[in-house]
Image (spheres, rainbow, N blue to C red):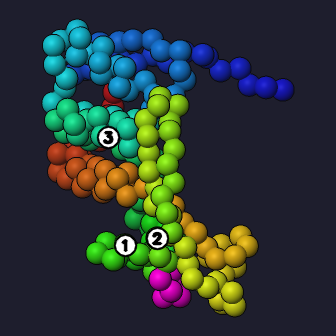
Amino acid sequence: MRQTKPGYNLQIGTENQLILDFALYPNPTDTLTYIPFMQSFASRYGRLPWKEIADSGYGSEENYRYMEEHGMEAFVKYNMFHKEQRMHYAPSPFHQDSLYYNEEHDYHVCPMGQHMNRIGTKRARTESGYHTESARYQARNCHGCPLRGLCFKGKGNRIIEVNHRLREYKRKAAGRLTSEEGRMHRAQILFL
């Protein structure tokens, strides 16, 4: 049996618990409603907010870029933020975000110390038409590696795709969210 879900999404903008703006969208995901909602806000008030506080449903590359380009200080979570903040959180050493990255020479290093060199760029487009880019890196030789079964299950040599722009936006977001001001904003969200 299929689950029925509403085909709409209500967005509400508040300040000090007062509703400043609202809009109804036919798209069920927050990610795709953020920019149209901000454009609605700007048309109503003649400006955008200076600070943006939102949950992880809004933490996408496209939305972070919009906030940065419009001078908004973004206290916006991304999908793994809460998990990363747990006291006993330990990311897998095999996850691509755990691999050492040499920015100067543009390569990653796998857990066995092998360089994963850049082999190209993957370009994609989101549902809203936003263009993203991910750099692709490949290990030279995974054959016979004692960690292969833990590292990845595919055939050939391991390939990872890294969106460097999104990674940088997440790094900035984490810094703001874990600051004293960020902790204060996060506490307020819990009680709305």
Work out whether residue 56 can be spotted: no
Q: Total marks drawn?
A: 3
Q: How crowded is mark 3: few (under 14 residues within 10 Å), some or many (20 or more)?
A: many
* CA distance separating discs 1 and 2: 7 Å
- Residue toward you, 85 or 2: 2
Above or below, comparing residue 171 to residue 93 in the picture: above
- Mark 3–mark 2 Cα distance, whole angstroms, equals 25 Å
Q: Is 22 left or right of 150, judged from the image as shown?
A: left
Residue 113 on the magenta segment:
yes
Q: What stretch is highlighted in magenta?
A: 110-115
User: Dot 2 corresponds to which residue?
Assistant: 118
Q: Is the magenta stretch mostly helix, strand or loop?
A: loop
**Marks 1 and 2 in Cβ contact (< 8 Å):** yes
Q: Quadrant of residue 192?
A: top left
* Amino acid found under the numbered disc labelled 3: Tyr
Q: In this view, does 162 lie to the left or right of 3?
A: left
Mark identifier at residue 106: 1
Mark 3 highlights which residue? 64
Label 1 amino acid? Answer: Asp
Amino acid type at mark 2: Arg
**In-front residue for pair 34/9:** 34
- Residue 186 image offset from top left, x and y in percent: 29, 41
Instruction: Give the residue furthest to the front.
Output: 120
Sequence-first disc among 3 and 2? 3
The single residue placed furthest to the top in the displayed view is 44
